[in-house]
Amino acid sequence: MWMDHPGWVLFGTWVGALLTLGIMSFLYKDNPVYKFCEALFVGISAGYWFVSYFWSNLLPKLGDPLMQGDLLVLIPGVLGIMMLLRLVPSIGWISRWPLAFVVGFTAGLRLITYLQSNAMTQLQNSVQPVISYSATGAFQFWPSFNMLLVTLGTFAGLLYFFFSKEHKGAFGTISRIGTWFLMVTFGAAFGYTVMGRMSLLIGRIDFLLADWLHLIN
C-alpha cells in the first residue's frame, strides 16, 4: 500500500510526534497549540467513530432491513433522527423523548447484568467462612487473615453509613475504622487510574524516544 512507503511512514511519525508535543505543552499552560491539537484529536475521533458506526451499525441494522422491506426498523430510525434534533435549538426539546427511552431501556437491560456481575458477586465474596482450611484439613493462616480483614472492613464500612445513631463511643471507633478502609479502597482505585494514565504517558514517551528520535531501541 502507498501508506507503507518509507516517506509516508516518516511523515506520519513526525506528525504524531509534533501533535504529541503539542498535547504535552499543556503541562506548561493552556495555549493555542494545545487547543489546536485537542480540537484536531476530537474532530478526527468523532469522524472515525461516525464512519465506523455507519458501516458497522447504521447500514446493516437500518439500511439493509429497509431495503428488504422490514418497516419495523423505522421506529428506531425515527427515534435516532429525533435525537439528532438536539442540534436545532428551536425544536431541540424533541430529543428528550428518545433520550428518555434510551435511558430507561438501558437501565432496565443492564440492571440484571450489573446486579449479577457486581452486587451479587461482591456479596458472595464477602460472605465466606472466616476460618479457612486446606483440602487436607490443615489450618490456613493467610487466607483466614484476609477473610477476617474483608469481614472487618465490610462491617466497619457499613457502620460508617449508619447515620441514625450518633458516631461516638465504641460505635464511633468502629465507624472511624470504616473510614480508613474506605480511604484505602478509594486510594487503590485512584492509584489504578493513575497507573493507567502513566501507562499512556510511558507509551507516548517511548514513541518519541524510539520511533521519532531513535535514542532507544
Image: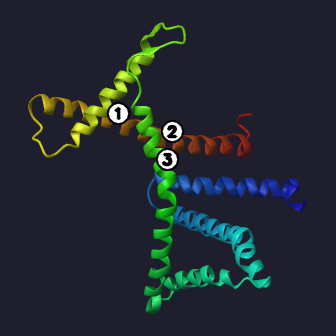
Q: Quadrant of residue 179?
A: top left
Query: Which residue position holds label 1?
Result: 184
Query: As drawn, is 79 to the left or to the right of 189?
Result: right
Which numbered disc, 2 or 1, marks the residue that appears first in the sequence? 1
Say whether disc 2 or disc 3 marks the residue closer to the N-terminus.
3
Judge whether residue 180 can be spotted in this image: no
Quarter in which the N terminus is drawn: bottom right
Circle nearer the viewer, 2 or 3: 3
- Apparent side of residue 118 relative to residue 19 in the rendered image (left or right): left
- Residue at 49% x, 54% y is 112
Circle 3 SS class: helix
What residue sits right under mark 3 in the picture? 116
Total marks placed:
3
From the image, tell me which residue sits under label 2: 195
CA distance separating discs 2 and 1: 16 Å
Left/right placement of residue 189 relative to residue 134 reads left
- Quarter of the C terminus within the rendering: top right
For the residue carrying disc 2, how many other residues have a C-alpha within 10 Å: few (<14), some (14-19), or many (20+)?
A: few
Under mark 1, the amino acid is Val
Camera-side residue of 12 and 57: 57
- The x and y percentages for residue 89 are 45, 88
Q: CA distance from mark 2 to mark 3?
A: 28 Å
Label at residue 20:
none
Name the spot of residue 106 as percent of width and height, x first: 50, 65
Q: Earlier in the sequence, mark 1 or mark 3?
A: 3
Residue at image coords 52%, 86%: 85
Which quadrant of the view contains residue 56? bottom right
Mark 1 residue crowding within 10 angstroms, few (<14) / some (14–19) / many (20+): few
Amino acid type of the residue that numbered disc 2 sits on in the rendered structure: Met
* Residue 8 makes an appearance in the image: yes
